[in-house]
Amino acid sequence: RKAVSCAPRGWRASWMLRVQAGKQSISPLMWAIRTSALDAARAMLVDLLTIRADRDRYYFGMDMLFDRHPDLVKTLTQIAPSLLPQLFDGLIWRSRATEDGMRRVNYFVKHLIVDASGNFSKTLEWIVETGDPKIVVHPLIAVTTDTLWTGIAMRDFFIKKSWTVFCLAVFSTGVSIFEAEVNTEQERYIIAACRCFTYLLSMCPRIVSHALRAVRAYGASDTMQILRCIPVPSYLKSGQEVADLLLMLVLVACLALEPVLQCLGSGDGFEGSGLFTQACPEVRALRKVYAVFALLGTFLFFRLTLDLAVFSTRVSAFVLICFRVVSEVALHLLGMTFVIAAFACGISALRVDNEFFATVPIAALSLVKMALWLFDPTQYDEVLEDPILALTVVFFLIVSMTFLLNLLIAQLSCAYHVVFQDMMGYARLNRAKVVVKCMPTIGKRRWQRFVDGLKLGQPCQFGPDDMGMPGAVQIKEPAAAHMVASDMILRFGGTTSPHAQWPEMEEDAGDSAEKDNYNRMEKMLDKALRRMQRPSGGRGGSAADSGSTSKRSATRSNEGSGSDAAGGSD
């Protein structure tokens, strides 16, 4: 602050962003960030994003900051993420005055939405890449995400997902609604039409899309390693993309096993014969395999529709929690598999005369039924006839039903407690990912209409008859949401020349006065402690006190006389 206090107010921001050394231009702010001088970088960010005003205009370093460092957010996410809250806080202005219980808030989101060339800024993409749920819940990022979502991304996302839901309905009609074998003529036509629609308009676009994306990924070496040896395109990091690829493969398998195609030349000598039939005897075994792939396809279609939860952050948070605690369920199933295998092999070694434990697979199936409460209770009488078998089964029930089940409940509770703290952050992070994914599909005209509708080039009011700076989106929030004790704009009187320095802020004097008060309080406490440590009671103590008192008075008198003499000489 002292280094830039002598800077002219019109060039104060440039002093912290550009220093010309010969032919090289150095940014003190970026130098402080890259050398880990975070205190200095924080002080510069605070000074740059402090709104100052004289009688003629406002001074705010936002535009100069992002013009000089358009990738500032990317740099902070990689080097100094602790400075991101400081940067985002400086881009929010809240009014001290309230109107009908509401407070005026200006969010300066211009450089978070639009870059220097007028296109979509990559700021939100850089924040999404961090995967930090605490950053995306910052009010500035939340407003930016919601503005892009409601203004331009939600429509494209809804259209895309509506098509997915429609394809799911058509696929389910073709494989689930009607009977599997014998159908009427109208039903056969409907089934054939639905399956043709699925193969042509659902399977083929997926094949083309994944083929093109895979070629581009391998051509640009944009791959990741699976099992440390198999390179796959990096876009498959997303669970939705993996589900989409698996759905494509399942649909290809369904087309290869399609019973309608297999029965086209089967003739008419069987029940349910006719055009587009699937009841011919030659494909009876094939229909079972086709049904398994149809089951997988249905599950994968429903998996792709889970993205619809992004319309509500509450529902999206619930879905994300379910996916994040599924690992605990997988650990429980792994433990149960080990216990069931151990007890099944052990019981089979007993060679008991019981049909439910005759072999290892049968014993394992019986133990699974017991663990799931599906075992016939009347059959326990046969188990109790053998004491060793009965004791082993009881021990298995204790381990599986009491120990492992309660351990699963404890694991789920702890995992939910950890995830719940960042639940809304993960939901907003998911919405931000959807927004970033939808942006490349937005046309230039539509994007320009959206930007023009935000009116980022027009001044945003600070109050009635008080026009502020452009680049902000104004929102009114409840006054109790954030308390504002003082005006966030530093207003100064006097000269309005851009060549003049800013007057010394009163905050400095206040800080020094506060320090003086603390020093004075410290001295008072020191004196009080010394008085409490004096010996009390008895004449010796009184004499000592009187002696020390007389010495202090003599010393004070000597000091007084010396000061008087010094004053006289002066």
Image (cartoon, helix red, strand yellow):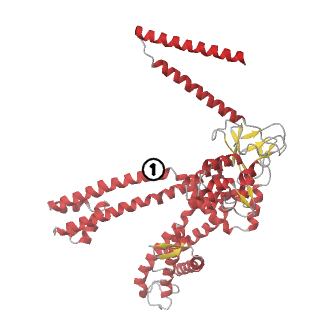
Above or below, 534 relative to 497 = above
User: Residue 111 is drawn in which quadrant?
Assistant: bottom right
Apparent side of residue 271 relative to residue 339 in the rendered image (left or right): right
**Most distant residue in the front direction:** 569
User: Residue 341 appears at what percent x and percent y?
Assistant: 27, 67
Q: Residue at x 76, y 66 (%)?
A: 445
Against 151, residue 560 (above or below) is above
Front residue of this view, candidates 29 and 244:
29
Which quadrant is home to the C terminus? Answer: top right
Which amino acid, by three-letter code, is at mark 1? Answer: His
The image quadrant where one finds the N terminus is top right
Q: Is residue 413 visible?
A: yes
State which quadrant residue 361 falls in: bottom left
Rendered location of residue 495, percent (x, y): 84, 39
Residue 277 visible in image: no
Q: Is residue 281 above or below residue 461?
A: below
Q: Which residue is mark 1?
A: 417
**What is the x, y in percent for residue 258?**
49, 83
Label 1 Cα crowd, 10 Å radius (few <14 / some 14-19 / many 20+): few
Secondary-structure class at tag 1: helix
Residue nearest the observer in this picture, 491 or 187: 491
Q: Which of the pair 86/94 is nearer the observer?
A: 86
Residue 192: % across, % down: 54, 81
Q: Quadrant of residue 382?
A: bottom left
From the viewer's perspective, is residue 228 above or below residue 5? below
198 vs 76, nearest the viewer: 76
